[in-house]
Image (cartoon, rainbow, N blue to C red):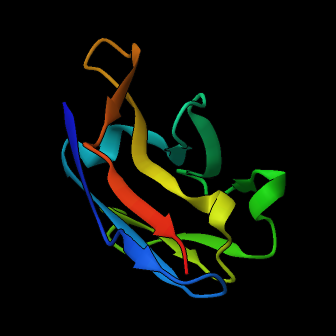
Amino acid sequence: QVQLVESGGGLVQPGGSLRLSCVATGNIFSINSMTWYRQAPGKQRELVATITAGGIINYADPVKGRFTISRSNARDTVYLQMNSLKPEDTGVYYCNAEYYSDSYTLLNAWGQGTQVTVSS
């Protein structure tokens, strides 16, 4: 089992920055990848950025060049550095971990979400 807790959201003006954190506990060595998603009001949840166990990183087109995903050396924390924030970045940001069960089934864990509001 893997558990996730996000933090770092808040209210920021357009052009500002925030850094989100996601701390994983439990069997962190079973994690295959960790992903940040976001969900704006009235919209579907969308992928923002992914980092795999092997260090491969991918970003959604709307955040390329502005957001950076990284992880701690212990691989138990994933960060999302968000720069040049825009009002359309507003939403609840969720951390997701894809991990292997004891029977090598791929499972998903989700954090509770953290609110990001970009507004003047």
Task: Determine whether, in the image, residue 78 is placed left or right of residue 110.
Answer: right
Q: Position of residue 51 (x, y in %)?
A: 59, 54
Q: Residue at x 25, y 42 (%)?
A: 112
How far across and down, in percent of the image, does residue 71 sit? 45, 69
Residue lying farthest to the front in this orientation = 120
Q: Quadrant of the N terminus?
A: top left
Q: Residue 53, can we see it?
A: yes
Q: Residue at x 27, y 47 (%)?
A: 28
- Is residue 72 visible to the viewer in this orientation of the structure? no
Relative to residue 89, is residue 1 drawn left or right? left
Residue 106, quarter of the rendered image: top left
Q: Is residue 70 above or below residue 84?
A: above
- The mark tally for this picture is 0
Q: Residue 107, relative to residue 24: is it above or below?
A: above
- Is residue 64 or residue 30 the one in the foreground? 64
Measured as percent of width and height from the top left, residue 92 is found at 42, 49
Residue lying at 67% horizontally and 58% vertically, measured from the top left:
88
Occupied quadrant, residue 102: top left
Q: Is residue 48 above or below residue 116?
A: above
